[in-house]
């Protein structure tokens, strides 16, 4: 990925992700099944997955990890663009203020 990718390019990459799944895989001791752990509705949910479906699930988990990385990069790019726009507007509209002489009350 580029150092400063454009937000539009990041959105295209996000849209290209076709499969996603949250969680992680853990191999069980018997070696024939895996544990797929994920959080749903504030609870840890465990699914037992046969070895034949592991490669598909690993790709889906990788898709979700890529999605989270790209959305963070998208947010960072939009924030950086917002701040640079704000900085330009502030510097363009800044007016030099003249010093005022204090008014001393007469007694």
Image (tube, grey):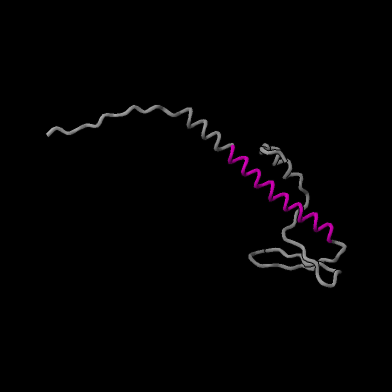
Q: In which quarter of the image is the N terminus?
A: top right
Residue at 72% x, 45% y: name it: 14
Q: Which residue is drawn at 67% across and 63% down?
A: 40
Pinpoint residue 99: horizontal percent, then vertical percent: 32, 28
From the viewer's perspective, is 20 left or right of 31?
A: left
Q: What stretch is highlighted in magenta?
A: 54-80
Looking at the rendered structure, the number of numbered marks drawn on it comes to 0
Q: Which residue is drawn at 81% across and 70% down?
A: 28
Percent coordinates x, y for residue 32 in the rendering: 86, 69
Decide whether residue 57 is among the magenta residues.
yes
| Residue at x-position 65% and y-position 43% | 74
Instruction: Give the answer, above or below, for where 64 lies relative to 45.
Output: above
50 lies left or right of 67: right
Q: Which residue lies furthest to the bottom in this view?
A: 30
Relative to 69, say whether 94 is above or below.
above
Tell me which secondary structure the magenta stretch mostly adopts: helix
């Amino acid at each position: 990925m580029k150092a400063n990718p454009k937000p539009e390019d990041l959105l295209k990459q996000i849209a290209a992700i076709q499969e996603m799944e949250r969680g992680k895989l853990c191999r069980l001791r018997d070696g024939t099944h895996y544990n797929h752990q994920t959080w749903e509705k504030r609870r840890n949910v465990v699914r037992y997955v046969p070895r034949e479906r592991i490669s598909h699930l690993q790709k889906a988990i990788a898709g979700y990890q890529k999605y989270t990385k790209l959305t963070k990069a998208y947010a960072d790019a939009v924030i950086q663009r917002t701040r640079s726009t704000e900085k330009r507007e502030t510097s363009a509209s800044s007016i030099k203020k003249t010093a005022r002489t204090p008014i001393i009350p007469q007694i």
